[in-house]
Image (cartoon, rainbow, N blue to C red):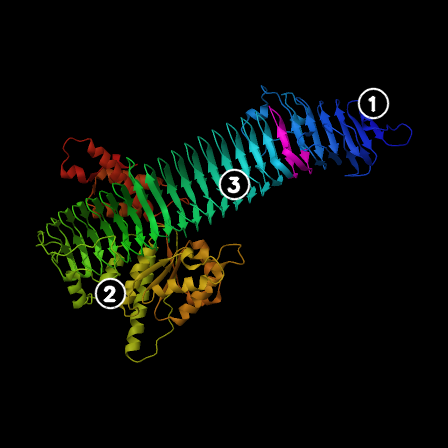
Amino acid sequence: MTLIRVAAKGRGAHRTITAALAAAPAGAVVSIEPGQYPEPLGLARRVVLEPEGGVGSVVVCPPAGPAVTVTAPNCVLTGLVLRGTDPAEPLVRVEDAAALTLEECELNGGRIEVVGSATGSSAVANASLAPDADLAAELADPVNGGGVLLLRRTTLGNARNTALHLTGDARARVEDTLIEEVDGIGAVLSGTAVLLAERLRVRGVSGSALRVRSAARLLALDCALTGAGRNGLLVQDDAEAVLAQCRIEEAARSGVRLSHAARAELVDCRVTEPGGNGLEATDTARLTARGCQIATPGGHGVLAVGSATVLLEETTVDHAGGTALHFGGHAVAMISGGRVRRSGDHGTAAVDGAQVEMAHSTLDGFRTCGVHIEGEARAVLDAVRVTGGETGVRIRSTAERPAELRDCTALGQRRSGVEIGTDSAAVLRGTRIADAGAAGVTVDAGGRLMMTGGGVSGAAGSGLVLGRGATAEVSGVRVDGSGKNAILVGDSVSGTFDHCDLTGSAFPALHIGKSSKVRFRGCRVFDCGQDVGLADGAEPLFEDCAAIRVRTAVLPTLTDRPATPPPPRPTAPFEPSTPNTPGHPTTPAEAELWQQGEPEPEPETLEDLLAELGELVGLDTVKRDVGGMVKLMQTVRLREQAGLPAPPLSRHLVFAGNPGTGKTTVARLYGRLLKALGLLTRGHLVEVDRSALVGEYVGHTGPKTTEAFLRARGGVLFIDEAYALVPAGAANDFGTEAIATLVKLMEDHRDEVVVIAAGYPDDMNRFVGSNPGLSSRFTRSLTFADYSSAELVSIVEHHAQRHQYELTTAARKALAEYVERIPRNAQFGNGRTARQLFQHMTERQALRVSELTAPDSAQLMQLDEQDLP
């Protein structure tokens, strides 16, 4: 290695850097004495320039033009300060086929420009981006053409237009580098350029932090883009960007914006406080986000319009100023494991002709609708939980295919859980609506409802409301505790209700409007003052229906009594738009019932309840434990009645089991058993999770937990996923306040409320051990084992019998083999999996039977092996 020295004095030293470069052979090291050098440097051979006095001791500041121009491969500048006079001009220029490394340098007053061939195409540019991509070989031998740049621990500042510009097929790698104070864009990639950035920081730029256009590609790892005057990342044309573990903070417009046919993938990234949208895709762009967080965007959390495609996995949108997830035009969105919290408008909106599929996601704290669908948009929701807000799911779409909700939950809306607009349609399968402030499900004029399984509980208004001219096909739905009617059928409605249970409505369970032709088959009405109210001209048909513990019954009181249409009983219908106080009458017939008062329902017997428990599939250990507790409590009651002191007894339980193992079903039965024993006054179930107990700010959690607890007075408070109150690794979390409040309430109301904490077996020990008060109160744990293959088959057969289907012998054998092959992984849903399997079988059977010319009743009921998925 040849060493050449630059100094003001000394034998053999060159007085200028330019003279030293002229004398330096390829591979030489030029050592420069501290000082300022007002000369432009041209690197035409492979050389290394380093300061003799350490980093920052040498300043290169030419009066005009670039400070450094590189035309040779593998040149290195270490520890130099480069200063330009015109921020809009290049300060460092790397020509086509040249290569430069800048390490621990400071550049001020101009940009770095790396030039490539406009028609060139490097191997890196053509390859798919990957986090382990490496440009080291390109720096040593740029055989593929295009300038190559490596930046390490370098600062770029005070530039105009851009601080780093890669053109053509240029390539660059940037590590631990800062770009700041740019009147324009931090870095621009065009042509087929490629930039690999690790721990790059961009701040204080008036334009976008990074812009990728043409067919350029960006890979960014652990980078921070802060305070951009426009977008954090802008990707255009056919460009591609991959970001992993990056932070994009306080961009004035969008955190990430894609247009044209651009593509971007974000992994474990965080977008915080953009002035506009968090993520935005337009035209035919494709955006993928996995494990990302979008926090406090001024606009939408995620926006996709045009024909863009968006894939979101395990991504959270928190505190959006607008809609958390907004899709318009003909955009397509697929969302899995998403979480929406506290949006200023909707949780999710699909408008125009957008198509949305959302699975295993939660939406909580939105202002208007959890999911809003309008225009010709369509949404398919699978296991989506919607909590709070004005409306849970609002469907105002005229799309050819109806919206679908599968195994979804809507809880605690101020208005309705599900609203289906005029001439709109929706299919609800296994969907549950609870504690709606108005109706559970409403269907406006001309709307269509297809609902199978699931139910409505605790609606302040009616459970199901069908407007004028609506149609309904409802099967296997349970409506509990409605403040008005269980089902309100408006004028000129048509459809069928099969095997529905209507319980405890304040007004007549069924109200049938004028000219409505509705068929009820195998339906049961329980525990209300009146079962049916009819308007003049109503034409319902009742088949095998029954009224049980109903004071004024027009239906048969036995399910095997011959069914005949009831005589007309004129009552006025409730208008869904009329504000009514829950529980108060608004028609003469209802006033009469109100004055007469509600009869005390006939109490359930222990024998009936224990028989109902015994009929559940599987759960042998749980049944034995519950039966033992019942016997213990019976003995306690006998001792109390004899004036003897009762032994210490904790009724609170831990239910440990995977999803779908029957925990909620048994919890509901447990409350009814305690009521039958006289240990609870109501025996009802109030189901909550972390979102219903934990507040959003200091001082909010205690009142929120108290409100939920007091709703369960006289019954059971069921805390689903209770371990979420003590997140692993979170020392300061509002969940600890919720637990402390629960412990005090359990003591203050120890004879009024039973608490059941449920969740995964591995996590419940952490919950119970988080507070000494919990461990002393939860002394008994019931383990809900996963269902065996034979039990899953029995559950499918139970659903088939309930809905009047019959499995052939071949179908039973094929079903057993099919169930045996189902993977028992994290997606396995136990009873939910069996229910979904039955639904798939009925759908496939329907398609098969539709091809028959005139199927008979046996064919309509029969499920064969070919109906298995």
Q: Is mark 2 in CB contact (under 8 Å) with mark 3?
A: no
Give above or below for 127 relative to 699: above
Residue visible at 53% across and 26% down in the picture: 215
Cα distance, mark 2 to mark 3? 64 Å
Which residue position is annotated with label 1?
23
> Is label 1 or label 2 in front?
1
Q: Is mark 1 in CB contact (under 8 Å) with mark 2?
A: no
The magenta region covers 151-180
Give the quarter of the figure containing the N terminus. top right
- Labels 1 and 2: the sequence-earlier one: 1
Looking at this view, is 157 or 137 the one in front? 157
Outermost residue on the top side: it is 119
Which residue position is annotated with label 3?
253
Residue visible at 42% across and 35% down in the picture: 305
Q: Regarding mark 1 in the picture, which secondary structure is present there?
A: helix
Residue 130 pos. (x, y %): 55, 32
Q: Regarding mark 3 in the picture, which secondary structure is present there?
A: loop
- Labels 3 and 1: the sequence-earlier one: 1
- Identified by mark 1, the residue type is Ala
- Identified by mark 2, the residue type is Leu
Looking at this view, is 758 or 246 the one in front? 246
Which residue position is annotated with label 2?
606
582 vs 327, left or right, is left
Q: Regarding mark 2 in the picture, which secondary structure is present there?
A: helix
